Amino acid sequence: MSQASIKNKKLMTVEEYLRFEERSKYKHEYIDGETIRLHDSGKDAQMAGNRVSHIFIVSNLCFYLRLALQKNGKPCQVGTTEMRVLLRANHYAYPDVFAVCGEFALVPNIFDTLENPVVIFEVLSKSTEIRDRGDKAVDYRNLASLTDYILVSQNKMRVEQQTRQEDGTWKIFVFEKPEDKIFFASLGCGIIVAEIYENIKFPPQPHLKLVESKKKNGK
C-alpha cells in the first residue's frame, strides 16, 4: 500500500478494534493489538508522485483484471480496500486489490470482512514494503483460499507473483518486461505487465556510472 503506517501506542482487543473501526472515518488495519491507519499524513503518502502512481496502478489492476474475467466468463469479482480481509484471529487487513470466486465468505456478525480471497495484490511503497513482505505476507499465504499473492512496485516496472504449488509450497515469479503476462490459474485468466503500468511515470533512477565515479573519487 502507498499509505504510511503509524502504530497507536494503546493496544486494543479485537472487539475494541471492530467497534472503533465501525465509528472511525479512517480505515485501520489490525495486528496483535496494534492498529495501523491507512491514508496517513506521513512523508511517503504526501509525495504526490507516489500517491498518484498508487491510485492509477490500483485502478489499472481492477479494470484489466475485470476485463480478463469477463472474457473467460468465470464467476469472480474484484474488490479494493473498501472491504477488509480476515487473515487470522488477530490480524485484519485491507488489501489494495483482491479477487474472489463463487460465493463471498463473510465473517458472521462482522461488517465488510471477507474470509476467502483467491488472489491478492499489494502495491508497494517504502513505508509499507517491509510489512507487505513480512508478517502480512506470512498470514496471507496461510489463508486456505489464497492461490496468488502479488507485490507490485510503483517506482519501477516489477511485479512479483507468489503462487501456491500443489504440494502447498510457494513459488516466486518476477515480471519486468511490458509484454510479460501474469497468469492466474485459479481465475483462468491473466493480465499483462504493460496494462498494470498504463500511463504510469516512474521516478528517475540514479545513474550507475555516476554513482560509481563518485565512490572512486571518495565523494
Image: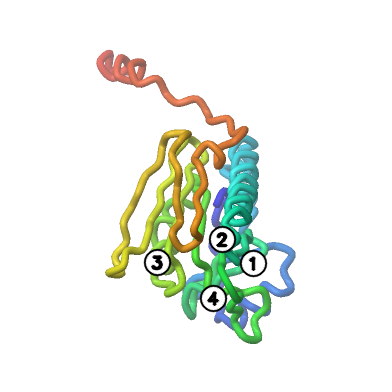
Q: Tell me the SS state at disc 2.
A: strand
Q: Tell me the SS state at disc 3.
A: helix
Q: Are marks 1 and 4 in contact (CB under 8 Å)?
A: no
Could you tell me residue 79's position as x and y percent? Answer: 63, 61
Report the residue marked by disc 2: 98
Could you tell me residue 101's position as x and y percent? Answer: 56, 68
Report the residue marked by disc 3: 141
Tell me how far mark 3 sits from mark 4, CA to CA. 13 Å
Residue shown at the point (60%, 60%) measured from the top left: 73
Report the residue marked by disc 1: 83
Q: Residue 219 lies in what quarter of the image?
A: top left
Q: Are marks 2 and 4 in contact (CB under 8 Å)?
A: no
Q: Is residue 141 visible?
A: yes
Q: Are marks 2 and 1 in contact (CB under 8 Å)?
A: yes
Tell me how far mark 2 sits from mark 1, CA to CA. 9 Å
Label 1 vs 3, first from the N-terminus: 1
**Which residue is at the far bottom?**
109
Q: Is residue 35 visible?
A: no
Q: In the picture shown, does residue 91 fall above or below 190? A: below
Q: Amino acid at mark 4?
A: Glu
Q: Any mark on residue 173, and which?
A: none
